[in-house]
Every structure is written in C-alpha cells, then in structure tokens.
Image (spheres, rainbow, N blue to C red):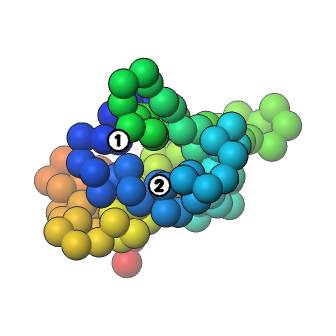
Amino acid sequence: MEDRVGHYPEFREFFIRRFSLDTGSLSRPGYVRAPSGMIYSLVFVGRSGEHFPDGIEIYALADALEPLNEKDIDTDLWALLRWMIDGIGGDWRVEDLDATGRLYQLPFLSQQS
C-alpha cells in the first residue's frame, strides 16, 4: 500500500485522470492488467482532511486459489510503477525510475530489453 499519493500532486492527478475519480463512482476500484497477465485491483483510499485519493492499495486478483509467483509480482509491480511514471510525465521519467532500480540491483530489471 502507498499510504500517501498526495506527497506529489502529480501522482494524485494521474490517478484522478486515469480512473475518472472526479466524475465516477468512488466506490469502484480501478483494474489494470500487468505483463504477467494478472489483473490488479487499485483501491483508492480517502482520509478526513486530505484531498482524494490520499492513498492507494494494490491487490493481485489471482485465479481461484493459485499461489502467487513472487517473481511475477515483483516484475508486475515494477511495470505498474513504470506505467504510472510514464503517465505522469513532466519531470517524472521512466529512465530515472529504471536507473534507481539498477542502483538497488533489482534482479528483474536485468531481464528487460
């Protein structure tokens, strides 16, 4: 869970635009399909006194009772971060995110072309 998407307004604005949070039902989560084919549910969190959304929870929607593959989950979450950064644009660049991942030696980044 990212409990504070409002620390940079661009993050909040991205989710509002992408999922029409300013016009649609706030009770519906957003759904995204990741590279593994798994679908993730993005649940937007509100807090008293904060602009909505103030946080986001990400849930993997696994088929039946199949166990989750940790490698796929890590790769998918990185892909979701890349999707978000690309959608925000401006000073937020995917290349900078990937460079940070390489600094931390995230193993799944070596598989990307």
> Can you tell which quarter of the image residue 50 is in?
top left
At x 33%, y 34%, the residue is 4
- Cβ atoms under marks 2 and 1 closer than 8 Å: yes
Which residue occupies the foreground of this view, 64 or 61? 61
Where residue 2 appears, x then y in whole percent? 39, 35
* Kind of residue indicated by mark 2: Phe
On screen, residue 78 versus residue 20, left or right, reads left
Q: Which residue is mark 1?
A: 5
Where residue 22 appears, x then y in whole percent? 54, 53
| Vertical position of residue 7 compared to residue 72: above or below | above
Q: Quadrant where the C terminus lies?
A: bottom left
Where residue 104 appears, x then y in whole percent? 19, 47
On screen, residue 39 versus residue 94, left or right, reads right
* Residue at the extreme top: 48
Q: Which residue is mark 2?
A: 15
At x 47%, y 55%, the residue is 15
* Kind of residue indicated by mark 1: Val
